[in-house]
Image: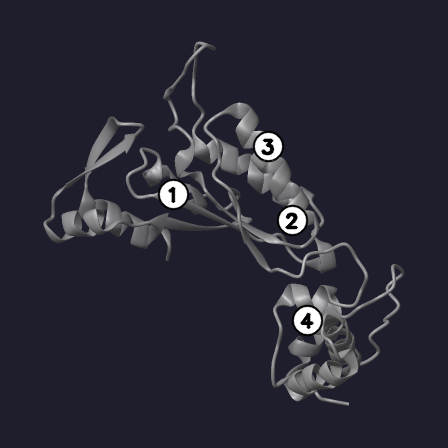
Amino acid sequence: MSRFAAPIAAQIWDMKYRFKRADGTPIDVTVEDSWRRIARDLARAEDKPAVWEEKFYQALEDFKYLPAGRITAGAGTARQVTLFNCFVMGTVPDSMSGIFDMLKEAALTMQQGGGIGYDFSTIRPRGADVKGVAADASGPLSFMDVWDAMCRTIMSAGSRRGAMMATMRCDHPDVEDFISAKSDSARLRMFNMSVLITDAFMEAVKADGPWELQFDGKIYHTVQARDLLEQDHAGHL
């Protein structure tokens, strides 16, 4: 039986990747059983499954090759789960119905074990007009709070903690709030967050020039590009 490099490695395998019955009884008695399960399942698509099963097993043996987590957890289990770790999701429409359609899609993807990534730059900024209902928009951060709550609620397949990535363009009017959001220890804890930087922004930083925050052709604020960059660095420490 192969030995794990450290006790924590054995613990993680047991918690997240070991195939078990519903009552917690291990089906993968050893890590070799996990390798065999994965190799046999992946080989089913080949013309000579028995030959390729051995090739795949030899690649996995002694941790020479480590598949992505969703493959390790899901292959050969006959469960309706994804074998892909991460999904770049579609464009979030700037409408209430479209946003919640995307939320549903995210929930179903996460239920099957997939990590998700969205660009929230397409949602109008906080305070913008919502035509036809005489209201102001709550902004992308408020909808990210909804995603965050959903992620905490959904039990992801294979004991995986929900995984989400959020991005926002560096010229979105709410980008400063986006950068500072996680300074609140109780907010957006299920997200990794990244600002999308453009060449034009970096040129403005080099020139120590102004930078316009805009949406749909309307300029909402003007800031110093370098100040925004330094705020982003501070927000990601």
At a point 79% along the width and 82% down the height, the residue shown is: 50
* Pointer 3 residue: 101
The amino acid at mark 3 is Asp
Pointer 2 or 1: first along the chain: 2
Can see residue 55?
Answer: yes
Mark 2 or 4, closer to the camera: 2
The amino acid at mark 4 is Ile
Pointer 2 or 4: first along the chain: 4
Res. 12 mark:
4
Q: Quadrant for residue 81, please give it.
A: bottom right
Pointer 4 or 1: first along the chain: 4
At a point 31% along the width and 33% down the height, the residue shown is: 173
Mark 4 or 1, closer to the camera: 1
The amino acid at mark 2 is Met
Pointer 3 or 1: first along the chain: 3
93 versus 27 height, above or below: above
Left/right of residue 80 with respect to residue 106 in the rendered view = right
User: Is the residue marked by circle 3 packed among few (<14), some (14-19), or many (20+) residues within 10 Å?
Assistant: some
Label 2, label 1: how far apart the Cα atoms are? 21 Å
226 versus 60 height, above or below: above
* Pointer 1 residue: 168
Pointer 2 or 3: first along the chain: 3
* Pointer 2 residue: 110
- Secondary element at tag 3: helix
Q: Residue furthest left?
A: 207
